[in-house]
Structure formats: C-alpha cells, structure tokens
C-alpha cells in the first residue's frame, strides 16, 4: 500500500464508511477514529451499485463530497490495514488534498483503480446509499 513521507493521520471517506452508515465497517471506523467534519476533493464519483468509487482529478469540474476523520498515530497503521482489506483490490489508498472549512488537509482516501466506462457518474458527487 502507499506510504507518505510524513505521518498522515486524516482519512477522507465518501461512501459506505460515512458516519450515517450502519455498515459494520463504518461502525468500526467510528470506534477507532474521530469525525472532524465535511470535506471535498476535485474528481468524479461513480455509482458501482452497492457502493461508490471515486477518482481524484485535480482538473475535474466536479467534486467528491465526504467526511474527514482523524486517527491517532498509534492507531493509524492498524486501522488502515483493516480498511485496506475491506476496500480490496478495486481501490488504492492514496493521499489527496481535501478542502475543508479550515483549508486543505492531506488525507488518506481510497480511490477506484478499475476502469470507469461502464459506471454512471454521480453528478452531485455525494453518495446517498
């Protein structure tokens, strides 16, 4: 999985890990991190049926909306390992700049690495389950 030269202790989520989700992994995330608030990054959000997939593109017209969590440095490696397994081979964990009410924050997020031609774009950039 990707690494960062400096410790990144923020995680940006946009789908089944959102705070409102009742999925077991969303509950696990809430138990091991703290919700900071809303954020967004330039890109596209795709509807993959049961869940979404995001592509980061700094030149995109659209935005992917989601939430930021903070994770202690001590807990980050363990939590990210669990999330890496949950996200599987369709996604790659990467650091992206996320716009928040307090400026840009570098965050881990999971980006779709599968071809996107077959999937519809979620024009609003917001996953509603």
Image (cartoon, grey):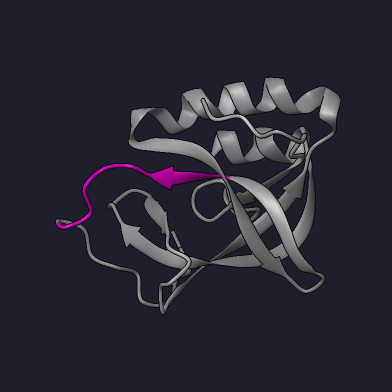
Where residue 25 sits: x, y (%)? 57, 34
Q: Residue 78 is drawn in which quadrant?
A: top right
Give left or right: position of 60 versus 107: left
Which residues are the magenta region?
Answer: 109-117
Q: Position of residue 7 (x, y in %)?
A: 77, 34
Question: Looking at the image, which residue is at 60% across and 21% down?
Answer: 81
Left or right of residue 34, residue 91 in this image: left
From the viewer's perspective, tell me whether residue 33 is left or right of residue 13. right
- The answer to whether 120 is drawn above or below residue 17 in the figure is below
- At horizontal 68% and vertical 37% (from top left) the residue drawn is 29
Q: Is residue 1 above or below residue 111?
A: above
- The answer to whether residue 121 is above or below residue 78 is below
Task: Give yes or no for residue 116 being in the magenta stretch.
Answer: yes
Which quarter of the figure is the C terminus placed in? Answer: bottom left
Residue at image location 74% in from the left, 39% down from the top: 8
Q: Residue 49 at x, y = what percent? A: 28, 52
13 or 109, which is in the foreground? Answer: 109
The residue most toward the left is 118
* Residue 6 placement: quadrant: top right
Indicate the position of residue 42 as horizontal and vertical percent values.
50, 68
Which sits in the foreground, 108 or 123?
Answer: 108
């Amino acid at each position: 999985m990707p690494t960062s030269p400096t410790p990144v202790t923020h995680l940006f989520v946009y789908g089944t890990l959102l705070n409102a989700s009742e999925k077991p992994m969303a509950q696990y995330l809430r138990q091991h991190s703290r919700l900071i608030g809303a954020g967004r990054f330039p890109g596209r959000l795709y509807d993959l049926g049961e869940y979404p997939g995001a592509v980061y593109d700094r030149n995109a017209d659209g935005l992917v909306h989601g939430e930021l969590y903070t994770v202690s440095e001590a807990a980050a490696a363990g939590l990210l390992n669990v999330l890496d397994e949950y996200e599987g081979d369709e996604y790659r964990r990467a650091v992206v700049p996320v716009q928040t009410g307090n400026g840009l924050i570098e965050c881990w997020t999971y980006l779709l690495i599968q071809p996107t031609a077959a999937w519809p774009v979620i024009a609003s950039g917001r996953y509603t389950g």
